[in-house]
Image: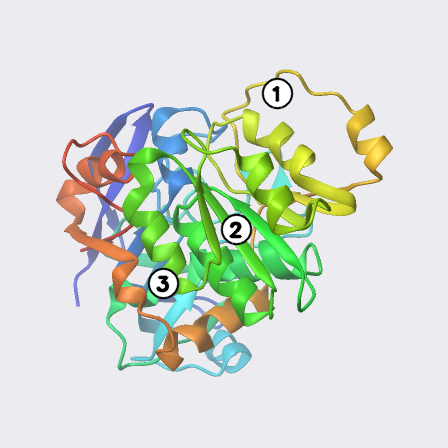
Amino acid sequence: MAATSRAVVQTAPRTLEFREFPLPEIGDDDGLLRVEACGICGSDYEQYEGVLPVRLPVVPGHEPVGRIERIGPRLAERWGVKVGDRVAVEALLPTAEGLISRGGLSAYGYLSVDRPPGLWGGFAEYLYLAPNSVLHRISESLSPEIATLFNPLGAGFRWAVAIPQLKAGETIVVLGPGQRGLASVIAAREAGAGQVIVTGLTRDKHKMALAREFGATLTVNVETEDLRGVVREATDGRGADVVIDVTAYATEAVTQAIDLARQGGRVVLAGTKGQKPVADFFSDRIVVKELTVLGALGVDYDGYDRAVRLIESGKYPLEKMHTHTMPLDEAERAIDMLAGKIPGEEAIHIALVP
């Protein structure tokens, strides 16, 4: 076994470099993961651009899957795992201070490398398994890249179903057809939603087609179609029971969500906007419609567990959602590709492999 781990480190906005970290000694209550793959999501791009408040330098990556290289007996007993097992690692690391403290967000991919042992992100050969890490065993039969979908799918189950308490037969509008938008489609179908309406742009044609394959009843190109009119017609003028915004940067989606929700409906805001204010926001619209507006950040144990079981079931062609597997050396290109910055590439989900 190697004595060090190579890792991608973000030192400044749009600045990545490789560093070597010594592998830590493992005690009774921690462990070490040999990373097989780590998914990339929109928040990785926002971190890379410098719009997320992260204390640099950090090893990015909060969607890791790998095999346990070393593990202390207490951590092994807690999660029922042993050396050699494949596991998915939850992003959040709960602490006594909560998830956000003076040190920033307590999560893999967001903790400074100045905090020993430094291996706090999935863009690396090895990941430190802290005593407060949360692990999920995941099937050996899956490719590691497909296994990393546990994170976006977990978000779908929590954000689109658990948080708004989506009920069978209800109509949900999903604003944005990216990873978490598609995951929300799957989760909503699993919850028995009556109608699932997904929005996107002209450039999202391939994502919209996949949304329909995953179970969306309607897809709407907001650049060429009247979204409000489509939703009103589909719901006999009532509006949607639930609207979830998973768009990045698009502040207009917030007011759109409020407009599309029915009287007494629920709105989930899960897409971060780069700290930009929302124009033309009138709180009276929430009051008059008696809406419930909910924020969504992370995923809980149940959401991840449901995601892992769904991936293992093979019920959906998730290989169509995973579009690229790339080496760590191409981390910068992979992040830009996911953000649509590479002409000719239609990326939905990308995984980096050491």
> Residue 308's x, y, as percent?
44, 72
Label 2 – label 1 distance at C-alpha: 23 Å
Does the rendering let one see residue 225?
yes
Residue with the mark numbered 2: 197
Would you place residue 125 above or below residue 257 in this image?
below
Task: Bin the neighbour count of mark 3 within 10 Å (Cα to Cα): few under 14, some 14-19, many 20 and up.
Answer: some
Residue 278: numbered disc: 1
Q: Quadrant of the C terminus?
A: bottom left
Q: Amino acid at mark 3?
A: Glu
> Residue 129's x, y, as percent?
42, 62
Residue at x 62%, y 60% (from the top left corner) = 161
Label 1 – label 3 distance at C-alpha: 33 Å
Mark 2 secondary-structure assignment:
strand
Task: Bin the neighbour count of mark 2 within 10 Å (Cα to Cα): few under 14, some 14-19, many 20 and up.
Answer: many
Does the rendering let one see residue 72?
no
Q: Amino acid at mark 1?
A: Val
> Residue 10's x, y, as percent?
31, 33
Between 40 and 324, the residue placed more toward the observer is 324
> Would residue 130 appear left or right of 84 to someone viewing this image?
right
Residue with the mark numbered 3: 213
